[in-house]
Image: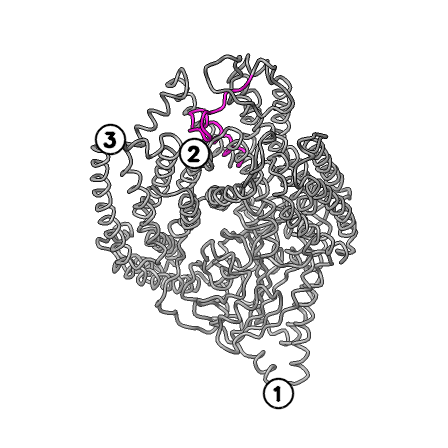
């Protein structure tokens, strides 16, 4: 058997390795290398202007918005764009894919290609776009905008192809006027055109008068305003108006420069939207629905809506645009730009040319779409050959029983022979959809094999964790080998399992190598084989231990075992449902409030009446948090109330620990402990005052005072460093948990925007009461004279009468009982509550950036993400520490309870693995990814923070015990 340290290390490695399995199975990049490019043609337009309003929602662009604090029906924020829709161009909704972030959004627009979900991190580094794009295919590109977007296209293109200028990162200050970001772009465009005018024979002017050129205007002000102030704020609305007011200026400048030659095509769109809480990334419709408006050379004018057959859905009908709506996928913008300029379609593009946007005869539209279909056929042929070469047995995709060439010939026959290009377009549409499905089929060809490996990995991990629990904490391994004959049989079985495991792994490794899979796929084979080898080697002893565990746990072992099993299944599946509906956690928490009275009604009510009422009250309070609106707005009153509540808890803990006691006063380190806690509370006071100053300054648009920024960082660092200096001076576990509680108070105060601080106080109180309830239920008071060993209870307040004591285990450490399964299950439940209780939905993008501005007012994604992640982890650390306290007070071995948690935790992960959605609404797809990612990440975090809690409680003792 592996040691306890091995369990933690392997657990961390396994979960971090398998968290990426959904990307290797469900969301594999469809990038195809070695495909042929379609031919170039004479473009309808000589130049194209692509304007991207970063973070612009479709409803804000098209609809009538009501300014905050004003009366009336509101007004349209983009009247000039609406004029273009009604009189000059074509419009619709561009549906984006997850992740709804800037890099994958721009790649889809410009390259026609959907990067896999992991590409979200590439946008935060200057990683180049490593595949074909309309920028690469164009003659030249001029672009201005953000330092987070432009460099990745510049570095991924031929030298000199793209002329780019971006502003300094310091200009992306969330606390300042965001319109300055867009002003920079408009001014740079004007300056470039003016320089060309002043030197008619210069290189710049000659380049600008060539064909197949692109102007790319990246307008980041909307996204920055949305993050800083939310999309229904005055700042966001003003930024939209500002963009709409300056677009006529852009059009006039370019038309004047080119002498109004009518050869310019214009596209205005967005890379992603933004949610009501000022975030994006997931598949919420507010993030995936973006505007798309096109006008100019080659673009069809507006088509009046047929009153008998409206084309608008309910979402867009309110916008009062009486013209035909033509929706598209975001990647469809790429072939549209390529067609307008006469470029080769980027070889990796999966976008379909939106022919309804073209001003052309049906036969011309047919030829344009046919070129698009041929480009897709090239991808299919190459991908099919690659997949076929990597399979021992291969089954090709069926195009309804006919080959691709035959289906293309049928479409040509309708268009050319029968002079029916509209029918030909329909056939091409169907063939294009088949080609997209064929590429998806080839991407998912190995699904069954890989999903089987992943399932065996998670089930095997649970089996290994169960084996570890039984052999270490239920029936120690040495107790099961007294019989030499049994030991010999076990050795033979172990050798057989080892030989079979080696054979199976070698076979899997050979298959994976033959398929030329990435090296990490070997881990997907290694971990299942490792876990199942250990599990099956010890299966007889594990089964024997479980039977013994059940038989010796209570007077009614079968009834209790069945009851606990039902409770486990019900609570675990309720947690799964809670990811979709947070209110489920409220119901469960309320039921937990009455659980002690159901478990031991008379005994608990008699001995722990006050504790029971406190527990019930805290469960009711905690149930309320998951009923609150997950979209939080900054509330200084709640921040102050929670900050004062934290101080109150700190004072209470101080008084409880340092009561006048001769025994306590004689302890070494008592004075240092007193001073340390007082200093921690002083840091909390400073953090609260500084937070108030920062909030008021930011609210008044005065920016973040540098004094507040420095003080806040000092408080954050000091609150983490100070506990390390005095945590170990006292071994009393109550002292340790109080120091830990106060360590996180300044951080949460600074990062709090609403009720998160109050949740932290209530959560801490609930966990402290939980461990008291568990200890109260764990031991039965007995009269003196019992023949069992009698030891004094952890009862400094004298809650028991003098005739009563509590039975503790006769050894220094006891073995697990069946009832300990309940403790592990509740720990897992409270771990989930620590995530959902703060009002955050099951999506990372739900976390507001408002609080981070008090530390980092300028856009630094990794630093901001790290702070938000740390804010999330704080409840997990606290929960793990209290599990360690229960472990300590019940005299169980270290990791005993936590090892049981590991057996159950991946039930959630496996649920979400099979609930991954790859089709349907973007909301469903995005949320399914978030669910699996969060559940799997929580499992890995549990292992890490549990190890951390062991360090925090190292050497901790009960109040009456001597310090080691």
The reply to whether the C-beta atoms of the residues labelled 3 and 2 are less than 8 Å apart is no
Give the residue at mark 1: 201
Residue receiving disc 3: 483
SS class, disc 1: loop
- Can residue 327 be seen here? The reply is no
What numbered label is drawn on residue 900? 2
Q: Residue, x 34% and y 54% (percent of image)?
A: 521
Q: Mark 2–mark 1 contact, CB under 8 Å? A: no
Q: CA distance from mark 3 to mark 2?
A: 28 Å
Viewport quadrant of the C terminus: top right
Quarter residue 263 falls in = bottom right
Q: Secondary structure at mark 3?
A: loop
- Of residues 718 and 366, the one nearer the viewer is 718
Q: Position of residue 292 (x, y in %)?
A: 56, 56
Looking at the rendering, the stretch of residues picked out in magenta corresponds to 805-831
Q: Is residue 297 above or below residue 469?
A: below
Q: Position of residue 84 (x, y in %)?
A: 63, 59
The quarter of the picture where the N terminus appears is: top left
Whether 818 is drawn above or below 399: the answer is: above
N-terminal of the pair, mark 2 or mark 1, is 1
């Amino acid at each position: 058997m592996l040691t306890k340290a091995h369990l933690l290390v392997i657990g961390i490695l396994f979960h971090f390795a398998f968290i990426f399995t959904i990307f290797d199975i469900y969301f594999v990049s469809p990038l195809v290398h070695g495909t042929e490019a379609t031919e170039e043609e004479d473009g309808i337009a000589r130049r194209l202007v692509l304007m991207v309003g970063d973070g612009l929602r479709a409803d804000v662009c098209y609809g009538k918005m009501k300014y905050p604090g004003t009366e009336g029906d509101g007004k349209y924020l983009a009247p000039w764009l609406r004029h273009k829709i009604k009189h000059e161009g074509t419009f619709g909704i561009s549906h984006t894919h997850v992740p709804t972030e800037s890099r994958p959004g721009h790649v889809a627009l410009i390259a026609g290609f959907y990067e896999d979900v992991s590409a979200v991190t590439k946008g935060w580094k200057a990683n180049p776009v490593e595949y074909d794009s309309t920028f690469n295919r164009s003659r030249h590109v001029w672009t201005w905008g953000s330092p987070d977007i432009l460099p990745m296209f510049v570095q991924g293109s031929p030298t000199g192809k793209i002329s780019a200028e971006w502003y300094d990162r310091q200009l992306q200050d969330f606390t300042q006027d965001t319109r300055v970001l867009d002003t920079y772009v408009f001014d740079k465009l004007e300056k470039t055109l003016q320089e060309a005018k002043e030197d008619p024979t210069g290189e710049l002017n000659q380049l600008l008068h060539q064909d197949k050129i692109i102007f790319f205007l990246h307008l980041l002000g909307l996204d920055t305003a949305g993050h800083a102030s939310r999309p229904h704020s005055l700042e966001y609305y003003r930024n939209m108006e500002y963009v709409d007011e300056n677009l006529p200026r852009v059009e006039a400048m370019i038309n004047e420069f080119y002498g109004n030659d009518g050869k310019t095509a214009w596209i205005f769109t967005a890379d992603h939207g933004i949610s009501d809480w000022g975030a994006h990334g997931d598949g919420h419709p507010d993030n995936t629905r973006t505007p798309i408006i096109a006008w100019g050379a080659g673009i069809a004018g507006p088509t009046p809506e047929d009153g008998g057959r409206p084309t608008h859905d309910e979402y867009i009908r309110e916008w009062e645009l009486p013209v035909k709506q033509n929706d598209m996928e975001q990647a469809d913008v790429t072939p549209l730009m390529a067609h307008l300029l006469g470029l080769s379609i980027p070889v990796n593009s999966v976008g379909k040319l939106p022919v309804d946007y073209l001003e052309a005869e049906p036969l011309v539209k047919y030829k344009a779409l046919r070129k698009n279909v041929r480009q897709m056929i090239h991808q299919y042929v190459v991908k099919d050959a690659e997949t076929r070469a990597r399979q021992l047995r291969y089954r090709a995709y069926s195009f309804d029983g006919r080959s691709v060439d035959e289906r293309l010939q049928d479409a040509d026959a309708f268009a050319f022979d029968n002079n029916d290009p509209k029918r030909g377009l329909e056939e091409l549409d169907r063939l294009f959809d088949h080609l997209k499905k064929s590429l998806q089929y080839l991407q998912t060809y190995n699904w069954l094999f890989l999903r089987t490996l992943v399932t065996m990995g998670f089930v095997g991990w649970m089996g290994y964790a169960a084996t570890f629990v039984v052999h270490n904490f239920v029936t120690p391994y040495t107790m099961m080998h007294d019989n030499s004959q049994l030991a010999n049989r076990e050795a033979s079985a172990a050798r057989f399992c080892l030989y079979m495991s080696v054979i199976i792994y070698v076979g899997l490794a050979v298959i994976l190598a033959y398929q030329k899979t990435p090296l990490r796929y070997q881990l997907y084979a290694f971990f299942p084989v490792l876990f199942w080898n250990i599990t099956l080697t010890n299966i007889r002893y594990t089964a024997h231990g479980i039977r013994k565990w059940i038989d010796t746990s209570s007077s009614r072992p079968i009834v209790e075992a069945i009851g606990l099993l039902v409770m486990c299944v019900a609570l675990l599946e309720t947690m799964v449902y809670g990811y979709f509906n947070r209110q489920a956690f409220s119901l469960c928490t309320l039921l937990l409030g009455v659980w002690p009275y159901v478990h031991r009604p008379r005994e608990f009510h008699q001995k722990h009446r006050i504790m029971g009422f406190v527990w019930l009250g805290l469960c009711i309070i905690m149930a309320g948090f998951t009923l609150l609106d997950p979209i939080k707005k900054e509330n200084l009153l709640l921040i102050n109330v929670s900050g004062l509540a934290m101080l109150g808890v700190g004072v209470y803990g101080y008084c409880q620990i340092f009561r006048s006691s001769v025994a306590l006063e004689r302890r070494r380190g008592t004075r240092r402990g007193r001073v340390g806690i007082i200093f921690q509370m002083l840091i909390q006071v400073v953090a609260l005052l500084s937070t108030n100053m920062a909030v008021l300054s930011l609210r008044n648009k005065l920016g973040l005072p540098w004094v507040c920024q420095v003080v806040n960082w000092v408080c954050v660092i000091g609150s983490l460093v100070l506990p390390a200096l005095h945590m170990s001076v006292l071994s009393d576990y109550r002292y340790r948990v109080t120091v830990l509680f106060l360590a996180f108070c300044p951080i949460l105060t600074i990062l709090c925007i609403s009720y998160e601080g109050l949740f932290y106080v209530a959560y801490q109180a609930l966990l402290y009461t939980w461990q008291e309830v568990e200890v109260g239920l764990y031991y039965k008071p007995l009269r003196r004279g019992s023949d069992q060993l009698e030891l004094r209870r952890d009862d400094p307040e004298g809650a028991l009468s003098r005739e009563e004591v509590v039975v503790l285990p006769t050894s220094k450490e006891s073995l697990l009982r069946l009832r300990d399964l309940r403790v592990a299950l509740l720990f897992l439940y409270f771990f989930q509550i620590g995530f959902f209780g703060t009002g955050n939905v099951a999506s990372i993008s739900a976390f507001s950036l408002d609080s981070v501005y008090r530390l980092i007012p300028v856009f630094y994604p990794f630093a901001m993400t790290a702070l938000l992640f740390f804010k999330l982890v704080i409840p997990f650390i606290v929960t793990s520490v209290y599990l360690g306290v229960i472990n300590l007070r019940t005299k169980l071995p270290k990791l005993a309870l936590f090892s049981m948690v590991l057996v159950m935790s991946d039930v959630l992960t496996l649920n979400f693995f099979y609930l991954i959605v790859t089709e349907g609404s973007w909301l469903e797809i995005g949320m399914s990814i978030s669910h699996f990612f969060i559940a799997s990440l929580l499992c890995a975090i549990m292992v890490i923070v549990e190890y951390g809690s062991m360090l925090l409680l190292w050497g901790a003792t009960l109040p009456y015990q001597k310090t080691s």
